Amino acid sequence: MSRKNDFYLYFWGGLIMLVVGLFFLSQKVTVTNSFWGGGIRLMGMHISSGLVIVPFIFSLVWIFIRPNKGSKIAMVLSVLLIIASLIQSTRFYIQYLTLFDWVVMLVLIFGGAAFIAKSMLIKF
């Protein structure tokens, strides 16, 4: 086989393995979010989730009253704070798995990634 055929074989085979492994993993993971129920920890302080919206409201009012560079920076920072609090409040739980299922998923994911990496190292 030529090097070009090796590239396609490793790349597509690895991509299929990676996608199948990630699909199996995604079927066994439960994702929950408790944004409104809990709160976030920011620099050692517990902040209620509703209080994260307050800087956004103030910066929104500030933009309508006097739009300037400071109000736009405050708006961007408040949106980033909301996104960070959403990400921080997200929880991932892996459902019951047998050892065989776990090993098969890991082999498919990391084996597929290794084949893709190997295909990128093949020179034409």
Image (cartoon, rainbow, N blue to C red):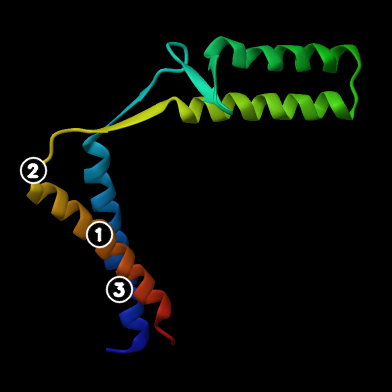
**In the image, residue 6 lies at what x, y percent?**
31, 81
Q: Which is more N-terminal, label 2 or label 3?
A: 3
Q: Are marks 2 and 1 in contact (CB under 8 Å)?
A: no
Q: Residue at x 35, y 68 (%)?
A: 116
Q: Is residue 122 above or below residue 40?
A: below
Tell us which disc is closer to us: 3 or 2. Answer: 2
What kind of residue is marked 3?
A: Tyr
Report crowding for label 1: few under 14, some 14 to 19, many 20 or more residues within 10 A (C-alpha): many
**In the image, residue 104 lies at what x, y percent?**
14, 54
Measure the C-alpha gap from mark 3 to mark 2: 29 Å
What kind of residue is marked 1?
A: Met
Q: Which is more N-terminal, label 1 or label 3?
A: 3
Q: Is residue 73 above or below residue 118?
A: above
**Quarter of the figure with the C terminus:** bottom left
> Where does label 3 land, which residue?
10
What kind of residue is marked 2?
A: Thr
> Where does label 2 land, which residue?
98
Query: Which corner quadrant of the image does residue 38 belong to?
Result: top left
